[in-house]
Amino acid sequence: MRSVFSLVLVLGMALAGFAVYMVKGYVADTEQALIAERERAASSVATTDVLAVSKPVLFGDAITPEDVVTVKYATDFLPEGTFPTLADLFPEGEAQTRSILRPMDVNEVILASKVTAPGEITSITQELRQGMRAFTIRVDASTAVSGFLRPGNRVDIYWTGAFGDAPEETWLIGSAIELIAVDQSTDRNSVDQVVPSTVTVQVSPDDVARLAQAQADGRLTLSLVGADADLTIVPDGAQAITLPEAPEAPVIVADAPAPAPEAVPETCYTTVRRGTETARMEIACTN
Protein backbone atom coordinates (compact mmCIF):
# COMPACT_ATOMS: atom_id res chain seq x y z
CA MET A 1 0.00 0.00 0.00
CA ARG A 2 2.80 2.28 0.91
CA SER A 3 4.55 1.49 -2.34
CA VAL A 4 1.41 2.35 -4.31
CA PHE A 5 1.06 5.61 -2.41
CA SER A 6 4.69 6.46 -3.06
CA LEU A 7 4.29 5.71 -6.76
CA VAL A 8 1.20 7.89 -6.99
CA LEU A 9 3.02 10.67 -5.18
CA VAL A 10 5.98 10.47 -7.52
CA LEU A 11 3.73 10.47 -10.58
CA GLY A 12 1.79 13.42 -9.21
CA MET A 13 4.92 15.41 -8.59
CA ALA A 14 6.21 14.57 -12.07
CA LEU A 15 2.96 15.66 -13.66
CA ALA A 16 2.94 18.84 -11.61
CA GLY A 17 6.51 19.61 -12.66
CA PHE A 18 5.67 18.95 -16.31
CA ALA A 19 2.62 21.20 -16.05
CA VAL A 20 4.71 23.98 -14.52
CA TYR A 21 7.27 23.57 -17.35
CA MET A 22 4.56 23.77 -20.00
CA VAL A 23 2.99 26.84 -18.39
CA LYS A 24 6.37 28.59 -18.25
CA GLY A 25 6.98 27.81 -21.90
CA TYR A 26 3.55 29.10 -22.89
CA VAL A 27 4.01 32.27 -20.86
CA ALA A 28 7.45 32.83 -22.39
CA ASP A 29 6.11 32.35 -25.91
CA THR A 30 3.25 34.72 -25.20
CA GLU A 31 5.62 37.35 -23.85
CA GLN A 32 7.84 37.03 -26.92
CA ALA A 33 4.82 37.38 -29.19
CA LEU A 34 3.68 40.48 -27.30
CA ILE A 35 7.16 42.01 -27.54
CA ALA A 36 7.31 41.31 -31.29
CA GLU A 37 3.86 42.81 -31.78
CA ARG A 38 4.88 45.94 -29.87
CA GLU A 39 7.99 46.25 -32.05
CA ARG A 40 5.93 45.88 -35.21
CA ALA A 41 3.46 48.46 -33.96
CA ALA A 42 6.29 50.86 -33.13
CA SER A 43 7.87 50.44 -36.57
CA SER A 44 4.64 50.62 -38.59
CA VAL A 45 4.25 53.59 -40.99
CA ALA A 46 1.09 55.62 -41.30
CA THR A 47 -0.24 55.62 -44.86
CA THR A 48 -2.58 57.76 -46.94
CA ASP A 49 -4.73 56.69 -49.87
CA VAL A 50 -3.77 58.46 -53.12
CA LEU A 51 -4.48 57.91 -56.81
CA ALA A 52 -2.03 56.23 -59.19
CA VAL A 53 -2.11 55.07 -62.81
CA SER A 54 -3.11 51.46 -63.43
CA LYS A 55 -1.04 51.13 -66.62
CA PRO A 56 2.06 52.68 -68.21
CA VAL A 57 1.25 56.07 -69.75
CA LEU A 58 3.31 58.27 -72.07
CA PHE A 59 3.52 61.95 -72.82
CA GLY A 60 0.28 63.18 -74.38
CA ASP A 61 -1.85 60.17 -73.34
CA ALA A 62 -5.31 60.96 -71.96
CA ILE A 63 -6.37 59.26 -68.73
CA THR A 64 -9.89 58.58 -67.49
CA PRO A 65 -11.18 57.18 -64.18
CA GLU A 66 -10.75 53.66 -65.65
CA ASP A 67 -6.98 54.27 -65.82
CA VAL A 68 -6.68 55.13 -62.13
CA VAL A 69 -6.29 53.02 -58.96
CA THR A 70 -5.97 53.84 -55.27
CA VAL A 71 -2.66 53.00 -53.56
CA LYS A 72 -1.30 53.56 -50.06
CA TYR A 73 1.59 55.97 -49.66
CA ALA A 74 3.64 56.76 -46.55
CA THR A 75 2.05 59.84 -45.02
CA ASP A 76 5.34 61.34 -43.83
CA PHE A 77 6.80 61.14 -47.34
CA LEU A 78 3.74 62.14 -49.35
CA PRO A 79 4.84 64.38 -52.27
CA GLU A 80 3.10 67.65 -53.02
CA GLY A 81 0.32 67.62 -55.58
CA THR A 82 -1.26 64.17 -55.02
CA PHE A 83 -4.95 63.42 -55.59
CA PRO A 84 -6.76 61.58 -52.75
CA THR A 85 -10.00 60.90 -54.66
CA LEU A 86 -11.41 60.77 -58.18
CA ALA A 87 -13.34 63.94 -57.42
CA ASP A 88 -10.03 65.73 -56.88
CA LEU A 89 -8.56 64.43 -60.15
CA PHE A 90 -11.72 64.86 -62.22
CA PRO A 91 -13.65 67.71 -60.56
CA GLU A 92 -16.17 67.99 -63.40
CA GLY A 93 -17.17 64.34 -63.38
CA GLU A 94 -15.96 60.96 -64.58
CA ALA A 95 -16.53 61.87 -68.23
CA GLN A 96 -13.62 64.29 -68.01
CA THR A 97 -10.05 63.48 -69.11
CA ARG A 98 -6.60 64.81 -68.27
CA SER A 99 -3.46 64.53 -70.41
CA ILE A 100 -0.07 63.25 -69.31
CA LEU A 101 2.91 65.62 -69.21
CA ARG A 102 5.47 63.09 -67.90
CA PRO A 103 5.64 59.32 -68.57
CA MET A 104 4.54 57.16 -65.63
CA ASP A 105 4.74 53.44 -64.81
CA VAL A 106 2.10 51.17 -63.28
CA ASN A 107 1.09 52.23 -59.74
CA GLU A 108 3.08 55.46 -59.98
CA VAL A 109 1.40 58.21 -57.98
CA ILE A 110 -0.31 60.89 -60.07
CA LEU A 111 0.97 64.40 -59.30
CA ALA A 112 -0.43 67.72 -60.45
CA SER A 113 2.90 68.46 -62.17
CA LYS A 114 2.53 65.33 -64.33
CA VAL A 115 -0.93 66.04 -65.77
CA THR A 116 -2.65 68.93 -67.50
CA ALA A 117 -5.49 70.90 -65.99
CA PRO A 118 -8.90 69.17 -66.20
CA GLY A 119 -10.07 68.96 -69.81
CA GLU A 120 -6.88 70.42 -71.31
CA ILE A 121 -4.75 68.69 -73.92
CA THR A 122 -0.97 68.64 -73.92
CA SER A 123 0.50 71.74 -75.58
CA ILE A 124 3.55 73.94 -75.46
CA THR A 125 1.84 76.43 -73.15
CA GLN A 126 2.38 74.03 -70.24
CA GLU A 127 6.14 74.40 -70.76
CA LEU A 128 6.21 78.20 -70.64
CA ARG A 129 7.01 79.78 -67.30
CA GLN A 130 5.37 83.00 -66.18
CA GLY A 131 6.48 86.01 -68.21
CA MET A 132 8.31 83.93 -70.83
CA ARG A 133 7.64 83.53 -74.54
CA ALA A 134 8.24 80.82 -77.15
CA PHE A 135 10.31 81.60 -80.24
CA THR A 136 10.90 79.18 -83.12
CA ILE A 137 14.29 78.95 -84.83
CA ARG A 138 14.75 77.42 -88.27
CA VAL A 139 17.45 74.72 -88.24
CA ASP A 140 18.89 71.91 -90.33
CA ALA A 141 21.38 69.07 -89.86
CA SER A 142 24.37 71.39 -89.64
CA THR A 143 22.81 73.97 -87.32
CA ALA A 144 20.88 71.63 -84.98
CA VAL A 145 23.55 69.16 -83.76
CA SER A 146 22.50 66.48 -86.28
CA GLY A 147 19.20 65.63 -84.60
CA PHE A 148 20.48 65.09 -81.05
CA LEU A 149 18.41 67.91 -79.57
CA ARG A 150 15.58 67.12 -77.14
CA PRO A 151 13.05 69.32 -75.32
CA GLY A 152 14.60 70.31 -72.01
CA ASN A 153 18.13 70.56 -73.43
CA ARG A 154 20.04 73.83 -73.18
CA VAL A 155 21.91 75.28 -76.13
CA ASP A 156 24.26 78.11 -76.97
CA ILE A 157 23.09 80.25 -79.90
CA TYR A 158 25.53 81.67 -82.44
CA TRP A 159 24.81 84.31 -85.10
CA THR A 160 26.70 84.41 -88.39
CA GLY A 161 26.40 87.53 -90.50
CA ALA A 162 28.13 90.62 -91.81
CA PHE A 163 27.85 94.37 -91.42
CA GLY A 164 27.87 96.25 -94.69
CA ASP A 165 30.68 95.17 -97.01
CA ALA A 166 32.69 93.52 -94.20
CA PRO A 167 33.29 89.73 -94.35
CA GLU A 168 30.99 87.39 -92.40
CA GLU A 169 31.78 86.71 -88.76
CA THR A 170 30.22 84.51 -86.05
CA TRP A 171 29.25 85.73 -82.58
CA LEU A 172 27.88 83.96 -79.49
CA ILE A 173 24.60 85.77 -78.76
CA GLY A 174 22.99 83.51 -76.11
CA SER A 175 24.22 80.92 -73.57
CA ALA A 176 22.35 77.99 -71.97
CA ILE A 177 19.01 78.83 -73.62
CA GLU A 178 16.32 76.24 -72.84
CA LEU A 179 14.62 74.28 -75.61
CA ILE A 180 10.95 73.55 -74.98
CA ALA A 181 10.05 71.91 -78.29
CA VAL A 182 11.72 70.16 -81.21
CA ASP A 183 9.58 70.44 -84.32
CA GLN A 184 6.05 70.04 -82.89
CA SER A 185 7.02 67.78 -79.97
CA THR A 186 7.46 68.82 -76.33
CA ASP A 187 8.11 65.22 -75.20
CA ARG A 188 11.32 65.24 -73.15
CA ASN A 189 11.52 61.44 -73.23
CA SER A 190 11.35 60.99 -76.98
CA VAL A 191 13.96 58.58 -78.38
CA ASP A 192 13.45 59.46 -82.05
CA GLN A 193 16.65 60.78 -83.63
CA VAL A 194 15.46 62.79 -86.60
CA VAL A 195 16.89 66.01 -87.95
CA PRO A 196 14.39 68.73 -87.00
CA SER A 197 13.40 71.64 -89.19
CA THR A 198 12.59 73.91 -86.24
CA VAL A 199 13.28 74.18 -82.53
CA THR A 200 11.49 76.38 -80.02
CA VAL A 201 13.27 78.21 -77.21
CA GLN A 202 11.94 79.90 -74.07
CA VAL A 203 13.05 83.53 -73.75
CA SER A 204 11.80 86.91 -72.57
CA PRO A 205 9.59 89.09 -74.82
CA ASP A 206 12.50 91.47 -75.56
CA ASP A 207 14.74 88.54 -76.50
CA VAL A 208 12.09 87.39 -78.99
CA ALA A 209 12.62 90.67 -80.86
CA ARG A 210 16.40 90.22 -80.78
CA LEU A 211 16.21 86.66 -82.09
CA ALA A 212 13.79 87.69 -84.84
CA GLN A 213 16.22 90.39 -85.98
CA ALA A 214 19.18 88.00 -85.81
CA GLN A 215 17.35 85.34 -87.82
CA ALA A 216 16.35 87.90 -90.46
CA ASP A 217 19.84 89.40 -90.79
CA GLY A 218 21.93 86.21 -90.72
CA ARG A 219 22.08 82.53 -89.75
CA LEU A 220 21.51 81.02 -86.31
CA THR A 221 23.45 77.94 -85.22
CA LEU A 222 22.90 75.87 -82.05
CA SER A 223 25.50 74.18 -79.87
CA LEU A 224 24.31 71.58 -77.32
CA VAL A 225 25.32 72.27 -73.71
CA GLY A 226 26.30 69.23 -71.60
CA ALA A 227 24.07 68.18 -68.71
CA ASP A 228 26.98 68.43 -66.24
CA ALA A 229 28.29 71.75 -67.56
CA ASP A 230 28.83 74.61 -65.13
CA LEU A 231 25.95 76.76 -66.33
CA THR A 232 25.08 80.36 -65.64
CA ILE A 233 21.30 80.49 -66.06
CA VAL A 234 19.79 83.89 -66.75
CA PRO A 235 16.75 84.51 -64.51
CA ASP A 236 13.33 84.41 -66.17
CA GLY A 237 12.47 87.73 -67.79
CA ALA A 238 16.07 88.97 -67.88
CA GLN A 239 18.02 89.60 -71.09
CA ALA A 240 19.65 86.40 -72.36
CA ILE A 241 20.30 87.39 -75.99
CA THR A 242 22.93 90.02 -76.84
CA LEU A 243 23.35 91.02 -80.49
CA PRO A 244 26.71 92.25 -81.82
CA GLU A 245 26.96 95.94 -82.54
CA ALA A 246 27.87 97.17 -85.99
CA PRO A 247 31.37 98.68 -86.09
CA GLU A 248 31.51 102.45 -86.34
CA ALA A 249 32.07 103.72 -89.87
CA PRO A 250 35.48 105.40 -90.32
CA VAL A 251 35.41 109.19 -90.38
CA ILE A 252 36.70 110.49 -93.73
CA VAL A 253 38.40 113.88 -93.40
CA ALA A 254 38.31 115.87 -96.65
CA ASP A 255 41.55 117.51 -97.80
CA ALA A 256 41.63 121.26 -97.40
CA PRO A 257 41.31 123.07 -100.75
CA ALA A 258 44.54 124.40 -102.21
CA PRO A 259 44.98 128.12 -101.73
CA ALA A 260 44.20 130.22 -104.79
CA PRO A 261 47.31 131.56 -106.53
CA GLU A 262 48.08 135.15 -105.78
CA ALA A 263 47.28 137.52 -108.60
CA VAL A 264 50.41 138.77 -110.35
CA PRO A 265 50.10 142.45 -111.31
CA GLU A 266 50.21 142.99 -115.06
CA THR A 267 53.20 144.87 -116.37
CA CYS A 268 53.13 146.71 -119.73
CA TYR A 269 56.10 147.86 -121.80
CA THR A 270 56.78 149.99 -124.90
CA THR A 271 59.74 150.19 -127.22
CA VAL A 272 61.47 153.57 -127.70
CA ARG A 273 63.93 154.26 -130.57
CA ARG A 274 66.75 156.74 -130.18
CA GLY A 275 68.61 156.90 -133.38
CA THR A 276 69.87 153.50 -134.08
CA GLU A 277 69.22 152.25 -130.53
CA THR A 278 66.00 150.83 -129.12
CA ALA A 279 65.02 150.62 -125.51
CA ARG A 280 62.16 148.86 -123.66
CA MET A 281 60.36 151.03 -121.14
CA GLU A 282 57.61 150.13 -118.59
CA ILE A 283 54.42 152.05 -118.99
CA ALA A 284 51.00 152.04 -117.31
CA CYS A 285 48.65 149.37 -118.63
CA THR A 286 45.44 150.46 -120.24
CA ASN A 287 42.37 148.36 -120.91
Image (cartoon, grey):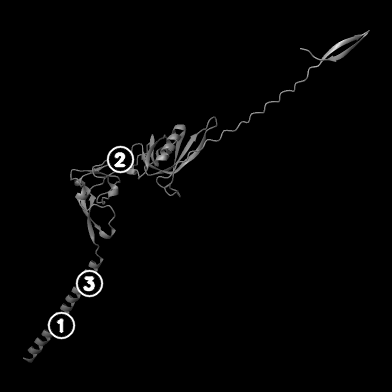
Looking at the rendered structure, the kind of residue marked 3 is: Ile
> Residue lying farthest left?
1
Eyeballing the image, is 182 above or below 229?
above
What residue would you read off at disc 3? 35
* Label 3: element kind: helix
Tell me where residue 123 sits by quadrant: top left
What residue would you read off at disc 2? 123
Q: Residues within 10 Å of mark 2 (few under 14, many from 20)?
A: some
Q: Residues within 10 Å of mark 1 (few under 14, many from 20)?
A: few
Compare residues 219 and 59 and report the one nearer the observer.
219
Q: CA distance from mark 1 to mark 3?
A: 27 Å
What number is the disc on residue 17?
1
Eyeballing the image, is 220 above or below 261?
below
The quarter in which the N terminus is drawn is bottom left
Eyeballing the image, is 11 above or below 157?
below
Mark toward the start of the polypeptide (1 vs 3): 1
Q: CA distance from mark 2 to mark 3?
A: 57 Å
Compare residues 176 and 9 and report the one nearer the observer.
176
Tell me where residue 77 sits by quadrant: bottom left
Closest to the camera, between mark 2 and mark 3, is: 2
Is 214 positioned to the left or the right of 37 in the image?
Answer: right
Q: Residues within 10 Å of mark 3 (few under 14, many from 20)?
A: few
* Label 2: element kind: loop
Q: Are marks 1 and 3 in contact (CB under 8 Å)?
A: no
The quarter in which the C terminus is drawn is top right
Residue at the image position 17 percent from the left and 75 percent from the top: 26
Compare residues 228 and 4 and report the one nearer the observer.
228
Is 214 positioned to the left or the right of 183 in the image?
Answer: right
Compare residues 167 and 65 and report the one nearer the observer.
167
Looking at the rendered structure, the kind of residue marked 2 is: Ser
